[in-house]
Image (cartoon, helix red, strand yellow):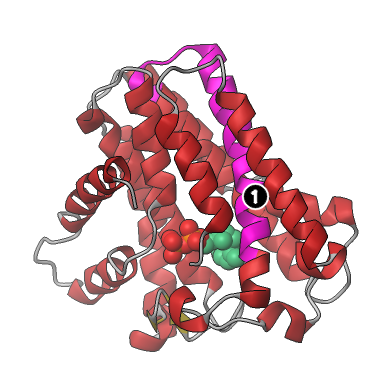
Amino acid sequence: MEQWYRTHVDQIEQYLSACFTEDRPWQALYTAMRYSLLGGGKRIRPVLTMEFSRIVGGNPEKALPFAAAIEMIHTYSLTHDDLPSMDNDDLRRGRPTCHIRFDEATAILAGDALQAAAFREVLSADLPEDVRCRAGLILARAAGEDGMVAGQVLDLAGETKPLTAEELEQVHKHKTAALIQAAATLGVIAGGGTEAQIGAASRFAKALGIAFQIRDDILDFEGDVAQLGKPIGSDVESGKTTFVTLYGLDRAKEMLQEQTEAAKAALIGAFDDIDGLLWLSDWLLERKY
Ligand code: GRG
């Protein structure tokens, strides 16, 4: 991992580590929230927020609440996705999932509270009110009924019937790419970037999000359980449509390459100092976890 990425991750983890530490009579909730939030993970989405803020000239300290909010939404989605009523997974990031470590009600409530805390972070950031409001709206749209949750609904429906190529794209545009797009655009907004830069960040992140999902499908097919920290083969086993099952492994790898190139192209001309983001795009192309 490159030093710039590590620097962002350290700042983000320090910020997240200070969350939900107060002594409360409902300590069990805070414990579960911290268990899910601080259990590792690549921190790709908040790193995007921090890096986009930096490359448009923002102060990283000011972008941190937006970055934390994105990671809280992501963590809530994973916690709920692992529940028995959804993916029913026992392992996440190499550790027992939240409902296994605690219990189902606690995992549901920890996810609920993380989602609300994300909006509290955005709305109470030390940034102008119009910036906070705009960021809150973008995050709500990306996470909610026409965003990530819609993607999850389409994804669950896809477990019972094969999906067409268009339907598969719809799932991943909503389930995976929407939050990655919000992560990038919130960074530009926090850093005071232009409208053109918001558009470019969004196009970059949409292609990166699709690439990210294709890689996820490839890893489910040929990944290493120990490196991934979660089981593999579940997609094929359940008959679920993925980029690999629909297009075959070779075509999926080509599509991954194409989306990565499209992502990188969106940055050219819109931003200076894009070396980190170009490296990140290539790193995600080859990621093993
Ligand atoms: C429950 C509303 C709701 C939504 C769930 C995010 C999600 C939607 C489901 C998780 C399953 C999945 C394969 C999602 C696609 C996005 C994805 C690959 C998430 C994993 O993200 P990483 O690899 O995870 O960034 P880490 O652990 O590194 O944070």
In the image, residue 150 sits, relative to residue 125, either above or below, namely: below
Closer to the camera in the image, 35 or 58: 58
Query: For the magenta stretch, what is the residue range?
Result: 189-216
- Residue at 42% across, 15% down: 193
**Farthest residue toward the left?**
23
Please rate how many residues cluster around mark 1, counting C-alpha atoms within 10 Å: few if below 14, some from 14 to 19, many from 20: many
Asked if residue 206 lies in the magenta stretch, the reply is yes
Which SS class for mark 1? helix
Above/below status of 155 relative to 232: above
Q: Which residue is mark 1?
A: 211
Q: Report the residue at 59% width, 21% height from top.
A: 199
Residue 157, quarter of the rendered image = bottom right
Q: Position of residue 58 (x, y in %)?
A: 29, 21
Ligand 1's quadrant is bottom right
Name the spot of residue 232 as percent of width and height, x first. 60, 81
> Can residue 149 be seen here?
no
Residue at (32% x, 63% y) in the render: 37
Q: Is residue 109 left or right of residue 23?
A: right
Does residue 235 appear anywhere in the picture?
yes
Q: Is residue 257 magenta?
A: no
Q: Nearer the viewer, residue 123 or 228?
A: 228
Q: Give the quarter of the image for residue 76.
A: bottom left
- Inspect the image, locate mark 1, and give the three-letter code of the amino acid beneath it: Ala
